[in-house]
Image (tube, rainbow, N blue to C red):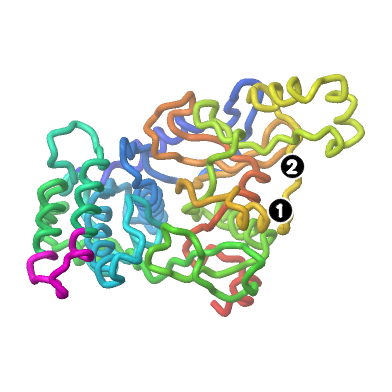
Amino acid sequence: MFISLILGFLLLTSISVKAGDTVKNFVFSDKKIVKHTSVKDQQRTGTCWSYAATSFIEAELIRMGYGESDLSEMYFVRNAYSAKGNRFVRFHGEANFSQGGQAHDVLMQINKLGFVPETDYKGNKYGSDTHVHSEMAAVLSGMLEAVVKNKNRKLSTAWNPSFEAVLDTYMGKRPASIEVNGKQYNPAEFAKATGFDADNYIELTSYSHHPYYESFVLEIPDNWTHTKYYNLPVEELMQVMKNAIENDYSVCWDGDVSEKGFSHNNNLAILPQIKIEDLTDSEKSKWSGMSTNERRKQMYSFENPVPEIEVTQELRQETFDNYVSTDDHLMHMVGKSKDQNGTSYYLIKNSWAESNDMGGYLYMSEEYVKLKTVAIMIHKDALPKKIAKKLGL
């Protein structure tokens, strides 16, 4: 059934991410976990944006009292491909067309075409048991390139129906009607019936090359719609995430996972200090006898808590400007914790299946979040009132 027993869901969550989790010699006490659905697997696709945003929406439906849901991620992917293709052609090929995307892509497609349960749209019609998009993406991209570079001096009326037919062949035709709990809906009607309103959600970032408390088009390739994000100082962005989790709102997280300190397999994302001169006096006594290589090996062993970099707004800006912090991956932030030293972490639900010791979750340190968050999506009611007022919301 599409709506499951909430009791079963709560039991699953308590088993998966219980208080007192131990990761190597890290001991976490979970202070808060927002109710959410189970871990999924994006498999061999670049569609983390849809998996993260869909997970976020499912958590919102639980918070709103609708119940536990399993929505189709590939329904949003199919619809976004259609929109991307049209935009690519309208921009004469001078637009991004790739597997990547942003959280707001899902909201935009909900406003246009609603959503459907996973059982009504699998999005896999190409003879594979798993989602594998490389061939499809290459075929679609090649087709669009041929369209915009054709020498006929005008576009035919056939390109768009042909493009849509390729999508239907690979992913399947979108359902015009679905049945949920004995009632018939089209996808837009179903989304409305759940009470979900895409207009209640906002995206925020924190970079100093634009004014704070205003919105701007975030300059990342996967923001192919040129959507605007609200800009906050990083300390206030951190307040937003903390306030959201503490008040039972989860966060759709977009950021960089290319650092050595990010290890899904080790269930951790941390920002270890490497330079001995950056350590406090008490920390120096522990690390000063080690060579740089020994310190590096210890810090990236993920065996024990280690001193972390103190992140500033200036460091955020520097790493964004020089491509060290890039828009790599979207995940779902569902809780917050502290380790045995009192260091704060956020509990992150990934979309790489239950492929680590925590069943697909990881702990991301506050400093990692502070530096490597490119953007977040939240319900606007998750904003602290003072920050909402500054943004005019």
**Residue 150 belongs to magenta span:** yes
Callout 2: 10 Å neighbours few (<14), some, many (20+)? some
Residue 64 on image: x %, y %: 39, 59
Mark 1 in CB contact with mark 2 (< 8 angstroms): yes
Q: Is residue 165 left or right of residue 104?
A: left
Q: Residue at x 57, y 65 (%)?
A: 383
Q: Is residue 185 visible?
A: yes
Question: In the displayed structure, would residue 235 be above or below residue 307?
Answer: below
Where does residue 41 sit, x and y in percent of width and height?
33, 36
User: What residue is rendered at 65% in x and 21% in y?
Assistant: 303
What secondary structure predominates along the stretch shown in magenta? loop
SS category of the residue bearing label 2: loop
- For the record, the magenta segment spans 146-160
Q: Amino acid at mark 1?
A: Leu
Q: Is residue 79 left or right of residue 378?
A: left
Residue 356 image label? none
Is 91 magenta? The answer is no
* Three-letter code, disc 2: Ile
Tell me the residue that label 1 is attached to.
Answer: 315
Q: Residues within 10 Å of mark 1 (few under 14, many from 20)?
A: few
Could you tell me how far apart the alpha carbons at marks 1 and 2 are, in whole angstroms? 10 Å
Front-most of residues 225 and 202: 225
Of labels 1 and 2, earlier in sequence is 2
Question: At 19% across and 66% down in the image, what residue appears?
Answer: 189
